[in-house]
Amino acid sequence: MDGVPCKRKIPESAKKWTEVQKRTWLHEEIAAFLDLFLFAENTQTISELHEGMSYMEHGRLYGYTCRVDGCNEVFMLHPMRVKHECSQHSFISPDLLTNDERDNEGYYKCRDVNCFLLYKTKASRNRHERKTHDNIPEQSSSVSGEPQEQVVEDYKYNYHVARLFYGLLMVNTHDSIREGDAARLMDCMKMSLLFFKKFKKHKYAYTVLLFLCKVFAILSEREAFHLCWNRFFNGKGGKGKNIPLDLKMEFYNHMLKSCLRMLGGNINAKSAQRVARCLTMMQKVLDSVDCDVRLVNKSGAHKLVEAQQAVSQIVNDLVEGNVFSFQRGREGYTAFPNFERDILKGLDYRDFFSWSRDLIKTWYAMYE
């Protein structure tokens, strides 16, 4: 904890700097660190997802133009364009020649080497192959005879970079709640949506996508503003002391249960409703009495015992393990032997686009 950086050393003149200069230098060092370990390769999947979905949305809105020079025909469906290009121009798109069983638009390719028809689902593709072609393998893709280059990874380095990426996302989410920054919280929710979809947390992904649709499309501008910003509570005043509004409701639920238990045998629907309606005023009365008698409530925040020692131990372990220095061929941990550096790797933009479009169609009928 008291060491000195070896590579990016603190300038000797830092002792004479103003607070603004120190803050500026620290922010630049943090930006350089994040660019090196997080944004260099961890954002590849996010970039591919953005570009792929933008490409597919453009085709859905404006149609699919023939990709042969001099031909300006536009088709409503991508398979019709591919069929036109093959039959009229003998043009074969490069994505039809890859080993991936789907093309860039997400359509399933016929696995016969001389057939370039596309199908929306795998079942329809397989049905076509059974009727039209013989000796089609059951597996989805053919194996290329060319040797593939084997990439030697540092799985321990990958693990810690991915963990840092995810940890900073969680810290950013909690900090945006404490500061009451709804705009930053929205950005964190957009990133969380990708994590939910990648790790098959379907209910969370559904809820977050519906929330974003309400904010940007379904609700009016005034209602969307209230939905975004009316989700924090600050009962103590001051900066960085907000809590989620849902947590405040949990406090009220706890108080309500205590009051209902005190009713004993007199509890019924009418009395329970009367108690529930006066919870807010009851809380104000209790806070006023506590203030008059100068009763200080014990904070419910969890505090780590000897946090300095725990942090020092963690830092020493990371430094001794040299975990943020890439060492080609280094094995990973026993529990995570082959850990990917890009934690979102494997999230296919074609699946994400189809999933989101289907839900948007469903919600359009519900909220029209």
Image: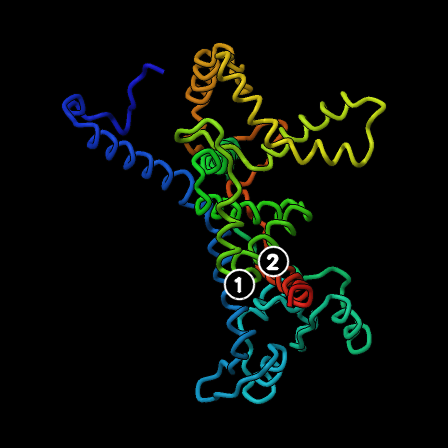
Tell me the amino acid under the disc marked 1.
Answer: Met
Q: What's the residue at 17%, 21% (across, down)? A: 15
Q: What's the residue at 68%, 31% (across, down)? A: 253
Which residue reaches farthest right?
A: 265
Q: Is residue 17 above or below residue 154?
A: above
Q: What is the crowding at mark 1: few (fewer than 14 residues within 10 Å), some, or many (at least 20)?
A: some
Instruction: Tell me: 312 left or right of 290.
Output: left
Q: Is residue 252 above or below residue 135?
A: above
Q: Are marks 1 and 2 in contact (CB under 8 Å)?
A: yes
Instruction: Determine the secondary structure under disc 2.
Output: helix
Q: Position of residue 363 (x, y in %)?
A: 66, 63
Q: Quadrant of the N terminus?
A: top left
Q: Quadrant of the C terminus?
A: bottom right
Instruction: Determine the secondary structure under disc 1.
Output: helix
What is the quadrant of residue 192 in the picture?
top right
Task: Kindly identify which numbered label has been placed on residue 352.
Answer: 2
Q: What's the residue at 16%, 23% (across, down)? A: 12
Instruction: Tell me: 152 left or right of 135.
Output: left
Instruction: Tell me: 184 left or right of 302.
Output: left
Q: Nearer the viewer, residue 187 or 266?
A: 266
Q: What is the crowding at mark 2: few (fewer than 14 residues within 10 Å), some, or many (at least 20)?
A: some
Q: Position of residue 186 (x, y in %)?
A: 49, 48
Q: Position of residue 217 (x, y in %)?
A: 54, 62
Dot 1 corresponds to which residue? 53
